[in-house]
Amino acid sequence: MTQPPSTDLTQKAERTRQRILDTALDLFVTQGYERTTLRDIAAAAECSLGLTYRYFARKEDLVLVLYNRLALELEAHVETLPPGRLSDRFYAVMQAHVKRLAPSQDALAALFGSALSPRSGIGVLGVGTADVRERVSAAFLNVVSEARDAPGKQQAHDLAIVLFGVHLGLILFWLQDQSQGQRITKEVLVFTRDLLALLRPLLRVPPASRMLARLARLIEPVVSPGNRAQAQDTPGAGK
């Protein structure tokens, strides 16, 4: 999998790399992801095909770099969150995440079909993006664990997995929201915050805790397969 930009790149090389990436995203919007080739990208970026291959061996690598960049920005934002209520922390993360995604919205929408295919190299739940999912799920674990009303270790893990899934659903909704200023997405984020605030105290009740654990076990192999084995080594179910 393509890694984030190397600090060893010269400024000129990094500018070239970024130009190729920006050009690719523009072409994905105007031509569609499937129809765009690396040769098209090289020509539009005014780079030789050989130089383009030097930075991106496959078309998929361009998208994976975008995913990595967004994941790193999400991680960095989570580290700055104050230790408030879990619902407020999740809301703040999603508000900021949607804002960061906004400049890439057209490109992400153009990737929509391939991104939803588990057989695609850029599928958000595919093998090629497992590293990105691990990074993002770890960020959501931080959101839960550092909250003032954080649950125990195992329940924090379960809740982080579920919130990771909720975040994917919210991003999907945001991509499809055609309301002015994406007003409905903003209202859905507020609703999600309020619902989480209402549900959080219920997770202290054993039946609710067990249902959360059951849901996490169902979706974890898909959204975060690398964490499943680790979770199985952790006994008990925190409240």
Image (spheres, helix red, strand yellow):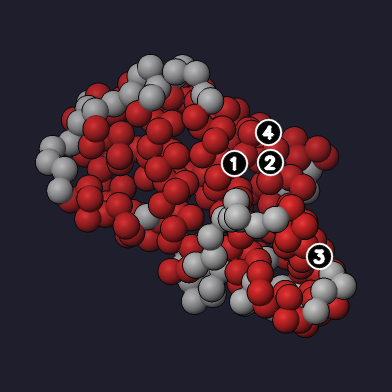
Q: Nearer the viewer, mark 1 or mark 2?
A: 1
Q: Which mark is residue 186?
A: 4
Q: Residues within 10 Å of mark 3 (few under 14, many from 20)?
A: some
Q: CA distance from mark 3 to mark 2?
A: 19 Å
Please tell me which of labels 3 and 1 falls first in the chain.
Answer: 3
8 horizontally vs 205: left or right: right
Instruction: Quickly name the residue at label 2.
Output: 100
- Where residue 157 sits in the image (x, y, percent)? 30, 39
- Circle 1/circle 2 CB separation < 8 Å: yes
Q: CA distance from mark 1 to mark 2?
A: 8 Å
Check disc 1 and give the amino acid type.
Answer: Glu
Check disc 3 and give the amino acid type.
Answer: Thr
Q: Secondary structure at mark 2?
A: helix
Between 126 and 201, the one nearer to me in the picture: 126
Instruction: Quickly name the residue at label 1.
Output: 73
Check disc 4 and give the amino acid type.
Answer: Lys
Please tell me which of labels 3 and 4 falls first in the chain.
Answer: 3
Compared to 119, does 185 lie above or below? above
Q: Which mark is residue 232?
A: none
Asked which quadrant contains residue 111, the reply is: bottom right
Q: CA distance from mark 3 to mark 4?
A: 30 Å
177 horizontally vs 233: left or right: right
Q: Nearer the viewer, mark 2 or mark 4?
A: 2
Q: Residue at x 68, y 33 (%)?
A: 186
Instruction: Quickly name the residue at label 3.
Output: 23
Q: Nearer the viewer, mark 3 or mark 2?
A: 3
Name, please, the residue furthest toward the left: 235
